[in-house]
């Protein structure tokens, strides 16, 4: 299928780029440092924590903060990965070649999206190795870990969808990265403005509002529906944008 051919080409092109390898290394280095610092703190306070009534488990102390930090770090780096998805095709004037190929606009967008999503899944799997290493010396709440990883994956999929759409709007990858970062940051910090009304519209629009329950192990269909609707909306917008380009004389 052309979708998977295009997705494979995108994934290969990412790994041929030093940027992707640098991002993988830097993200692992930063999160690894945070994880070890958190582990050191846990070991120092382990005896006192054990005396607490309803003391939090290792998963609550270690995993939720790690995945929360990962979300913030990846908010900064995902725009660098998505900026070139379509804008580079436009800048290199190879977009008309894609339009002339026997492939629909939907297949182009979904193929490119699956390519970048595959890279994000590899990144999530590498991050998951850190909490899984705790199994060597203790127990983990696997359900809570799985919920947290699901939340992180859905959030990265949402980041990728909006980054792909913004990349379709311009022929300048750097501009696409800056606008994507601004949009993601706005969706993240909008939660601060919703503190006075936690059930209001701003709270519902905030990504953080929907990610936090998953990091705590609470899986809600409303939170999952939010991310899926978010992804679907921006992929449709990207398809419509390419359709408009194709119909231009």
Image (spheres, grey):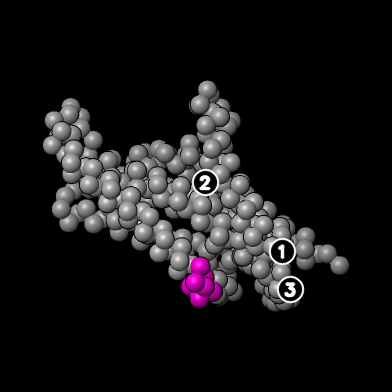
Q: Is residue 143 above or below residue 18?
A: above
Res 145 visible: no
Q: Quadrant of residue 132?
A: bottom left
The residue sitting at 45% across, 69% down in the picture is 21
Q: Nearer the viewer, mark 1 or mark 2?
A: 1
From which residue to which does the magenta span run? Answer: 11-19
Query: Looking at the image, which is closer to me, 100 or 32?
Result: 32
Instruction: Name the secondary structure under disc 2.
Output: helix
SS assignment for the magenta stretch, majority: helix
Residue beneath disc 2: 227
Cβ–Cβ under 8 Å for marks 1 and 2: no
Q: Which mark is residue 32?
A: none
Q: Measure the C-alpha gap from mark 2 to mark 3.
A: 33 Å
The numbered mark, 1 or 2, whose residue comes first in the sequence reads: 1
Quadrant location of the C terminus in the rendered image: bottom right
The residue sitting at 13% across, 30% down in the picture is 51
The residue sitting at 20% across, 32% down in the picture is 55
The residue sitting at 39% across, 42% down in the picture is 214
The numbered mark, 1 or 3, whose residue comes first in the sequence reads: 3
Q: Residues within 10 Å of mark 3 (few under 14, many from 20)?
A: few
């Amino acid at each position: 299928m052309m979708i998977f051919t295009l997705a494979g080409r995108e994934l290969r092109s990412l790994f041929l780029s030093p940027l992707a390898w640098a991002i993988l290394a830097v993200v692992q280095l930063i999160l690894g440092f945070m994880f070890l610092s958190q582990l050191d703190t846990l070991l120092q306070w382990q005896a006192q924590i054990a005396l607490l009534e309803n003391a939090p488990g290792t998963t609550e102390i270690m995993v939720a903060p790690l995945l929360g930090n990962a979300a913030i770090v990846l908010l900064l780096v995902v725009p660098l990965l998505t900026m070139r998805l379509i804008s580079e095709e436009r800048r290199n004037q190879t977009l008309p070649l894609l339009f002339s190929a026997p492939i629909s606009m939907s297949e182009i967008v979904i193929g490119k999206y699956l390519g970048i999503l595959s890279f994000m899944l590899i990144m999530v799997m590498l991050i998951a190795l850190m909490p899984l290493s705790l199994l060597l010396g203790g127990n983990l709440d696997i359900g809570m870990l799985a919920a947290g990883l699901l939340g992180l994956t859905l959030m990265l999929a949402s980041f990728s969808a909006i980054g792909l759409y913004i990349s379709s709007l311009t022929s300048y990858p750097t501009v696409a990265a800056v606008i994507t970062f601004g949009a993601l940051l706005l969706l993240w910090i909008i939660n601060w403005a919703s503190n006075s009304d936690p059930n209001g519209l701003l709270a519902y629009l905030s990504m953080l509002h929907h990610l936090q329950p998953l990091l705590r192990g609470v899986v809600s269909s409303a939170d999952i529906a939010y991310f899926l609707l978010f992804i679907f909306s921006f992929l449709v917008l990207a398809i419509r944008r390419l359709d408009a380009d194709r119909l231009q004389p």
